[in-house]
Image (cartoon, rainbow, N blue to C red):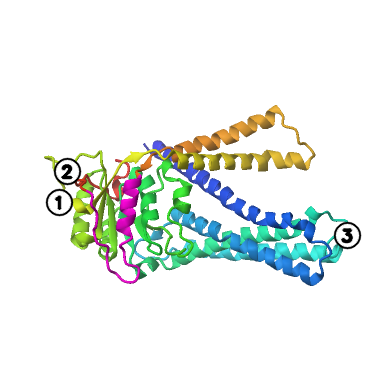
């Protein structure tokens, strides 16, 4: 049993690493794209005066820093998935210390790189080498832009994550949505993304983070991009809370009593679901609670399936699982692209540096292997259905009623006649 547990954890850690590496490659391509405009205008950068040179350099640095905004927020969201904040508002000191150090180092590194590069150009060759090609002149600004973007991405992500760990109760300053669901299931891997997207701008969604023990829990697109709002970057961060098996009831009771809205996926049922629904009924007013239910579930009105307290029909949103193939194809293409990029860095670029630009059987086998492995990992993480459009719109209408200016709660305005469903699970039931 212990060996099985160790293997399971190892596989989960491997998929977490795989997911994080995929996300890093995708995010780090944005700074590369930020450097392309300077290559495109390189032929116009001839005979620059020293003042004009530094003006264009400053503009390229500012452009690179601006292009790092989305990657930085997305990376911070993924970091907070790996290291959730404490449900009882205890700052995680180790996370704060090392992430702040990483932020400082990442902020200083591009400054040193750019300064050293510019000094080398000025001292040894002047602003530009007289014989430099247009591409070489553009590389000066492209490198400055890309290095700044990479540094700002890591520094800002680490700064946001460390700030959140230092202020674990920050989301309680405004109305927030509490989402309850069974771990490592459809509600935890797919419905959670729909709740994040449906939340009004600036309204945080809080939930107990599922244990990092299921390999399929690591879809990078869910944790990095679902519900991302650039107007409210901190407000759109998923508030992932860690709690022990012993303290989960106290944590949920407190969160339920403070939340502006409580959303529960009650499709799956376990013995602890009754306890959790009872706590929600005890600490939250009925008009603040919304239940999500797979329409294929057995209605609780049948004998032996009723769960007290009874759930009113206008408190439910029913959904149907269906395959969103366009989104699935797009995500799969991204994974294949990451596999190709890793092949290019490991095998392609070293060969080009040596003047070898021919594709042989070894390189072809390496390309097929790496891209194939990335697509296989994508299949594990992504092959699951989504929810229907009608349910998605209904969820968005309900959650839009959470007041952003006070602790007023949303009114249940659903027209759904879906009967109440089964229940939702506690922290210790995610493997049942």
Q: 142 or 395: nearer the eye?
A: 395
Let me know if residue 411 is in the magenta part.
Answer: yes
Q: Is residue 125 visible?
A: yes
- Marks 1 and 2, the one that precedes in the sequence: 2
Instruction: Identify the main secondary structure in magenta.
Output: loop
Magenta range is 389-416
Answer with mark 1 or mark 3, whichever residue precedes in sequence: 3
x%, y% of residue 335?
A: 54, 41
- SS class, disc 1: loop
Label 3 near label 1: C-beta < 8 Å? Answer: no
What is the crowding at mark 2: few (fewer than 14 residues within 10 Å), some, or many (at least 20)?
A: some
Q: Quadrant of residue 146?
A: bottom right
Residue 106 position, x and y percent, is: 61, 62
* Residue 276 drawn in magenta: no
Going by the picture, which residue comes out furthest to the top?
361
Q: Which residue is mark 1?
A: 310
In the rendered image, the quadrant that contains the C terminus is: top left
Mark 3 to mark 2 CA distance (whole Å): 81 Å
Q: Earlier in the sequence, mark 3 or mark 2?
A: 3
Q: Is residue 252 left or right of residue 365?
A: left
Picture layout, residue 219 above or below residue 38: above
Where's residue 219, x and y in %? Answer: 45, 45
Label 1 to label 2: alpha-carbon separation: 9 Å
Q: In terms of secondary structure, where does tag 3 sit?
A: loop
Tag of residue 130: 3
Which residue: 45% across, 40% down? 382
Residue holding disc 2: 300
In this view, the mark in front (3 or 2): 3
Badge 1 local density, few (<14 within 10 Å), some, or many (20+)? few
The answer to whether 155 appears left or right of 52 in the picture is left
In this orientation, does residue 247 appear?
Answer: no
């Amino acid at each position: 049993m212990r060996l099985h547990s160790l293997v399971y954890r190892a596989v989960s850690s491997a998929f977490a690493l795989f997911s994080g590496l995929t996300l890093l490659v995708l995010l780090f391509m944005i700074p590369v794209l930020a450097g392309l405009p300077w290559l495109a205008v390189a032929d116009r950068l001839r005979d620059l005066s020293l003042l004009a040179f530094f003006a264009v350099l400053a503009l390229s640095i500012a452009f690179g820093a601006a292009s790092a905004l989305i990657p930085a927020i997305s990376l911070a969201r993924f970091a907070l998935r790996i290291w959730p904040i404490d449900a009882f508002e205890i700052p995680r000191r180790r996370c704060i210390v090392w992430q702040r150090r990483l932020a400082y180092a990442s902020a200083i590194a591009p400054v040193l790189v750019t300064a050293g590069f510019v000094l080398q150009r000025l001292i040894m060759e002047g602003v530009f080498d007289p014989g430099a090609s247009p591409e070489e002149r553009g590389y000066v600004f492209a490198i400055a832009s890309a290095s700044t973007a990479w540094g700002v991405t890591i520094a800002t992500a680490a700064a946001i994550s460390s700030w959140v760990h230092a202020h674990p109760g920050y989301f309680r300053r405004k109305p927030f949505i509490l989402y309850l669901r069974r771990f490592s299931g459809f509600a935890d891997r797919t419905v959670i993304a729909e709740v994040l997207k449906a939340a009004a701008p600036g309204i945080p969604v809080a939930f107990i983070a599922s244990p990092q023990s299921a390999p399929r829990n690591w879809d990078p697109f869910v944790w990095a991009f679902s519900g991302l709002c650039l107007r409210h970057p901190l407000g759109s961060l998923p508030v992932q809370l860690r709690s022990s098996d012993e303290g989960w009831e106290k944590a949920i009771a407190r969160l339920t009593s403070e939340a502006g809205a409580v959303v529960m996926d009650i499709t799956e049922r376990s013995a602890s679901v009754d306890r959790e629904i009872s706590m929600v009924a005890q600490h939250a007013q009925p008009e603040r609670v919304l239940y999500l239910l797979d329409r294929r579930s057995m209605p609780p009105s049948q004998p032996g399936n009723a769960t007290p307290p009874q759930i009113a029909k206008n408190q439910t949103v029913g959904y149907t699982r269906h395959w969103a193939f366009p989104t699935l194809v797009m995500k799969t293409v991204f994974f294949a692209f990451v596999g190709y990029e890793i092949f290019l860095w490991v095998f392609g670029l070293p060969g080009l540096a040596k003047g070898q630009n021919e594709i042989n059987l070894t390189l072809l086998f390496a390309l097929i292997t790496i891209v194939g492995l990335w697509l296989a990992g994508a299949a594990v993480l992504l092959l699951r259905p989504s929810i229907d459009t009608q349910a998605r719109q209904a969820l968005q209408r309900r959650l839009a009623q959470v007041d952003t200016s006070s602790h007023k709660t949303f009114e249940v305005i659903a027209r759904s006649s879906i009967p109440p469903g089964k229940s939702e699970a506690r922290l210790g039931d995610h493997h049942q």
